[in-house]
Image (cartoon, rainbow, N blue to C red):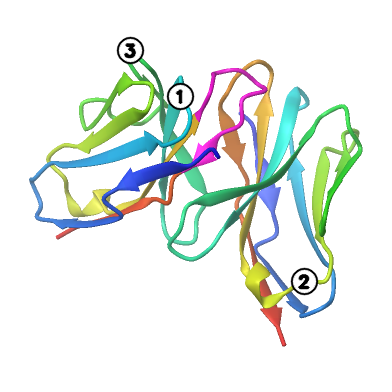
Amino acid sequence: GEDVEQSLFLSVREGDSSVINCTYTDSSSTYLYWYKQEPGAGLQLLTYIFSNMDMKQDQRLTVLLNKKDKHLSLRIADTQTGDSAIYFCAEKSGTASKLTFGTGTRLQVTL
Amino acid sequence: GAVVSQHPSRVICKSGTSVKIECRSLDFQATTMFWYRQFPKQSLMLMATSNEGSKATYEQGVEKDKFLINHASLTLSTLTVTSAHPEDSSFYICSASLGAGATDTQYFGPGTRLTVL
């Protein structure tokens, strides 16, 4: 089945850029997503990218997709303490609606 | 737009009782709703997919008689944990989407924390 992997933890200083990485195995992925989860809360959709795109930018967020290497990244510019959360990548393949989530990366922003 | 609510946000119950969790799409009609389970410090595990007016499709290993899902309208789906036991304690999250296709984005509810004593 599909497998989506992320590093567990990332610590950055306030004002620096954060880069959260994700690898997946399903070559038929159509859409890839980034979600943010704050403690005790549900998931907030941050952004998504269609599989035929290489990059998508939305204000402080930049998503890069390397389809050949099945590698997705989320860059957060000028990271703030409010960005501290768990970030999940997720992929959707074929015509299905089912999402497969990564293991989640906990981002800690220090002063 | 695209707001999904869950009720209750937190519930504590005794072992052997049944608990119902509601998931509502507040400002759109959700043809498809999903139910996930999340254990502490772990990722989301899809339990089932439900389409309005039809039976839910359960993922492998999820007991359909244990976790009853009803999707009676385009804005409401319910998950009932029957005869709950301590091992059912978890964070349950629903999501809703306009359709069941690849282009349909899922919008997530805030989650329900279930504790079974």
Q: Earlier in the sequence, mark 1 or mark 3?
A: 1
Where residue A79 is drawn, which disc sits there?
Answer: 2
Image label count = 3
Dot 3 amino acid type: Gly
Q: Chain of mark 2?
A: A
Q: Residue at x 81, y 51 (%)?
A: A73
Alpha carbon distance from label 2 to label 1: 35 Å
Q: According to the image, label 3 marks what residue?
A: B53
Dot 1 amino acid type: Gln
Q: Chain of mark 3?
A: B
The part of the image, by quadrant, that contains residue B100 is top right
Above or below, comparing residue A39 to residue B10 in the picture = below
Screen quadrant of the C terminus of chain A: bottom right
Q: Is residue B107 magenta?
A: yes
Dot 2 amino acid type: Thr
Q: Chain of mark 1?
A: B
Q: According to the image, label 1 marks what residue?
A: B29
- Residue B95 percent across, percent down from the top left: 46, 37
Q: Residue at x 28, y 29 (%)?
A: B63
Alpha carbon distance from label 1 to label 3: 13 Å
- Residue A6 percent across, percent down from the top left: 69, 53
Q: Is residue A71 visible?
A: yes
Q: Residue at x 25, y 48 (%)?
A: B88
Classify mark 1: helix, strand or loop.
loop
Which of discs 1 and 3 lies nearer the camera? The answer is 1
Q: Which residues are magenta?
A: B97-108
Above or below, comparing residue B66 to residue A79 in the picture = above
Above or below, comparing residue A107 to residue A92 in the picture = below
